[in-house]
Image (tube, rainbow, N blue to C red):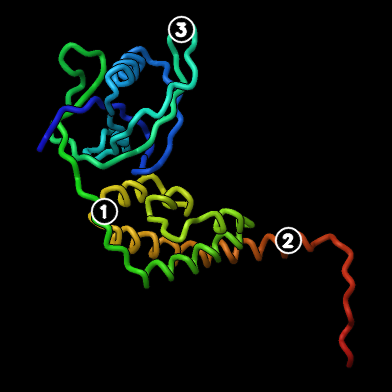
């Protein structure tokens, strides 16, 4: 069933469960946040990619207004809750200063493939080890979903949007696995090259060959 949702387009992709801190300064979005906060309601963040508003976005809830400034600016904490499709976009909702849309909720299918997850785990560990980020891997919960790591594997904005719009968890796993299979060997070789370059100019204790 469709419904009307206030929209706050941003040039980034937000995932369900992700926490996002925002500094609100534009008058129309100050209005949006105040009205949502007072009405205990949500708003949507559709990614603004390739000079256009995407027709799929993430609904977010306001966790808190951390700080209010003299000019009405605000620092807020939000969290992604669900994914929606925009059926009709309105540059300005009737009687409002901000955009909105008629939206339909999209189902998040959790059909995780444990074999794919094990492969992703192996590659993630290799990637973070090569980058010296072992602590980041160790902080992962065993029951993590792709949404939880999508910002931490070096995806482009377009790839992140592909993750957002994928129909199921297994499809999201396939996208990330394909990416890691390409990027991990490159990162590993690059780090080895950096180590070889660092050796140049250092005094070396080498054993000459016998001949």
Residue position marked by numbered label 3 in the rendering: 71
Q: Locate residue 79 relative to residue 99 in the image: left or right.
A: right
Residue drawn at 18 percent across, 11 percent down:
95
Q: Please name whichever residue, 181 or 100, is drawn nearer the observer in this view of the structure.
A: 100
Residues marked 2 and 3 touching at CB (< 8 Å): no
Work out whether mark 1 precedes mark 3 in sequence or the reverse, and give the earlier one: 3
Please indicate, yes or no, whether residue 51 appears anywhere in the rendered image: no
- Is residue 52 shown above or below 199? above
Residue position marked by numbered label 1 in the rendering: 166
- Is residue 40 shown above or below 78? above
The tag on residue 197 is 2
The total number of labels drawn is 3
Residue drawn at 84 percent across, 60 percent down:
201
Residue drawn at 31 percent across, 39 percent down:
81
Measured Cα–Cα span from mark 2 to mark 1:
41 Å
Discs 2/3, front: 3
Discs 2/1, front: 1
Measured Cα–Cα span from mark 2 to mark 3:
52 Å
Near mark 2 (Cα within 10 A), the count class, few <14, some 14-19 or many ≥20, is: few
- Percent of width and height locating residue 12: 38, 37
* Location of residue 87 by image quarter: top left
Residue drawn at 89 percent across, 82 percent down:
208
Please indicate, yes or no, whether residue 208 appears anywhere in the rendered image: yes
Q: Locate residue 16 relative to residue 189 in the image: left or right.
A: left
- Name the element at disc 1: loop
* Figure quadrant of the C terminus: bottom right
Measured Cα–Cα span from mark 1 to mark 3:
41 Å
Near mark 3 (Cα within 10 A), the count class, few <14, some 14-19 or many ≥20, is: few
- Name the element at disc 2: helix
- Percent of width and height locating residue 33: 34, 20
* Location of residue 35 by image quarter: top left
- Percent of width and height locating residue 122: 49, 69
């Amino acid at each position: 069933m469709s419904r009307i949702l206030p929209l706050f387009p941003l040039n980034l992709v937000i995932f369900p469960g992700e926490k996002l801190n925002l500094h609100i300064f534009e008058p129309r979005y100050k209005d949006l946040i105040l009205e949502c906060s007072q009405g205990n309601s949500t708003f949507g963040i559709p990614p603004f990619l390739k000079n256009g508003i995407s027709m799929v976005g993430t609904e977010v809830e306001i966790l808190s207004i951390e700080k209010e400034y003299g000019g009405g600016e605000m620092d807020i904490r939000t969290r992604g809750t669900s994914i929606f499709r925009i059926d009709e976009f309105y540059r300005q909702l009737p009687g409002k200063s901000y955009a909105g849309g008629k939206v339909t909720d999209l189902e998040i299918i959790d059909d995780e493939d444990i074999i794919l997850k094990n492969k992703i785990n192996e590659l993630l560990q290799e990637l973070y080890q090569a980058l010296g980020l072992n602590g980041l891997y160790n902080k992962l919960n065993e029951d993590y979903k792709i949404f939880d790591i999508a910002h931490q594997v070096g995806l482009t904005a377009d790839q992140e949007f592909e993750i957002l719009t994928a129909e199921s968890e297994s499809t999201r796993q396939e996208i990330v696995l394909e990416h890691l299979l390409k990027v991990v060997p490159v990162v590993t070789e690059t780090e080895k090259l950096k180590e070889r370059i660092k050796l140049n100019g250092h005094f070396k204790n080498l054993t000459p060959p016998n001949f």
